[in-house]
Amino acid sequence: MTGFLLQKLHGAIILTFGSSSPTAGTSVGVADRIALMTVMAGQNGDSQHLPDMKPNHTDELEKSNTWMLTEFNKLSQLRSLRLPDCLMPVRISRLTYTNSGGAILALGFNAVHKLWKWQGNEGKATSSVPPQLWQPSNGVLMTNDKDPGDAIPCFALSKNDSYLISASGGKSSLYNMMTFERMTTFMPPPPAATFVAFYPQDNNIVAIGIDDSSIDIYNVRFDEIKSKLKGHQKRVTGLAFSNVLNILVSSGADAQLCVWSMDEWEKQASKFLQIPPGRVSSPHAQTRVQFHQDQIHVLAVHETQIAIYKAPKLEYLKQWVPQESCGSVTDATYSCDSQSIYASVEDGSVWVLTATTLQPRSRISLDAYFPSNLSSRIYPIVIAAHPSQPNQFALGLTNGGVYVIEPPESKGNWGVILPLENGAGPSFNLAAALE
């Protein structure tokens, strides 16, 4: 491995992999970026009187750690794999791992799905072994009915990976994942489906966010709407269930979050994201939500920020805002163990944050996984976390590429923890970092 550059600037300790020359993207530019990469805490606009997230033992350990931000700026500094693709490269709109962890499913803006399956590595996704772009023997593709308007593509996999519900502005389709057969279509627009999530207790029931700001609780088997939830003001762009709290959390294009009881489907709480000062939310921003594995804390993803809330009352806990010059947040997700958050930004970078504190651990630049291409602006639109490997994630890019990203084998995880010595504060063992 090439040299390291260790600096302490603006209170941020930065470990940069690669050359220590000025062209390595370090020194003042990085320091200024870190200084301006903010973690804000506040409630009702008051950042001085916010009760912090009630920690468990793991949270306390995370908060006691001092992370040294690790920069990845070159292809040789991490493990990455562009998934092979013989089909037309089209901007990726949705991306997920299968629940088994052995395949990745993508939906392009052309309404065509792509499924990559790993045969090696015991059938688990990895950056070390290329997967196969899989199609059934008849060569059929899973292709949604497409609406040429302002559609929001969406899909959801059943828990057993056998069925897919997907929509690209037209009718919603139910597919058999083994044969790619379209088994049925339902809910023809207008209004169009904008998000879909399987009900945790029954694969026959799904929650479907609608362009008209409502949410349908739909029984696929009987082709009937069991309940229609009304409480949003704009189109619904995110849905997440909590078995622990027996609630559904939804999010809308106007940055509104709502909580619904799964018993009577009544609205229990509603709150708007706090847009950071100086930022403007676009009218069609896709606010998304995801539960921490404790099914109590909620990750809210918006173009201006990522934020942590505590359900069911939607207590606002923390907020992370990228520097304005880096562009908007494009997507974010918890790692499978909920210890990290992977956040992609418009400048092509991916940030690895500690989930409890939103403290940055690593910054992965576009150059670290994508060969230089100055002819077009390329960046991740969607990000997905492996369901059982906490340090692996996948990216779907504007140019249609899908990448699997993992840390160097020598490190095994993202970021470096500075140990505390005799309570005197952080120190750094360079030999340990080089191991």
Image: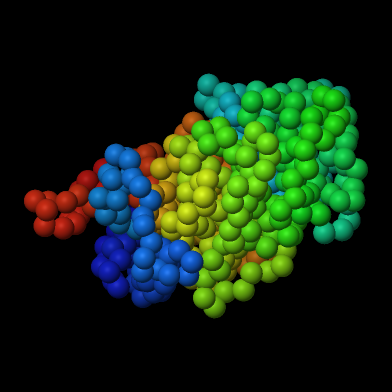
Q: In which quarter of the image is the C terminus?
A: top left
Q: Judge from the rendering whether residue 314 lies leftward or rightward of residue 143; answer left or right.
A: left
Question: Where's residue 273, x and y in %?
Answer: 56, 62
Q: Residue at x 47, y 34 (%)?
A: 389
Question: Where's residue 421, x and y in %?
Answer: 12, 51
* Residue 422 visible from this viewpoint: yes
* Residue 3 visible from this viewpoint: no
Residue 274's quadrant in the figure? bottom right
Question: Where's residue 85, x and y in %?
Answer: 71, 41
Q: Indicate how the structure is coloured in the image.
A: rainbow
Rendered position, 125 above or below 75: above
Q: Residue at x 57, y 74 (%)?
A: 279
Q: Residue furthest bottom?
A: 278
Give the camera-side residue of 81 and 170. Answer: 170
Rendered position, 176 above or below 218: above
Give the camera-side residue of 35 and 216. Answer: 216
Q: Judge from the rendering whether residue 111 lies leftward or rightward of residue 189; answer left or right.
A: left
Q: How many marks?
A: 0
Q: Which residue is drawn at 62% across and 73% down?
A: 280
Q: Which residue lies furthest to the left in this view?
A: 422
Question: Where's residue 50, x and y in %?
Answer: 38, 61
Q: Judge from the rendering whether residue 61 lies leftward or rightward of residue 222; answer left or right.
A: left
Q: Which residue is drawn at 63% across and 29% down?
A: 200
Residue 172's quadrant in the figure? top right
Give the camera-side residue of 37 and 404. Answer: 37
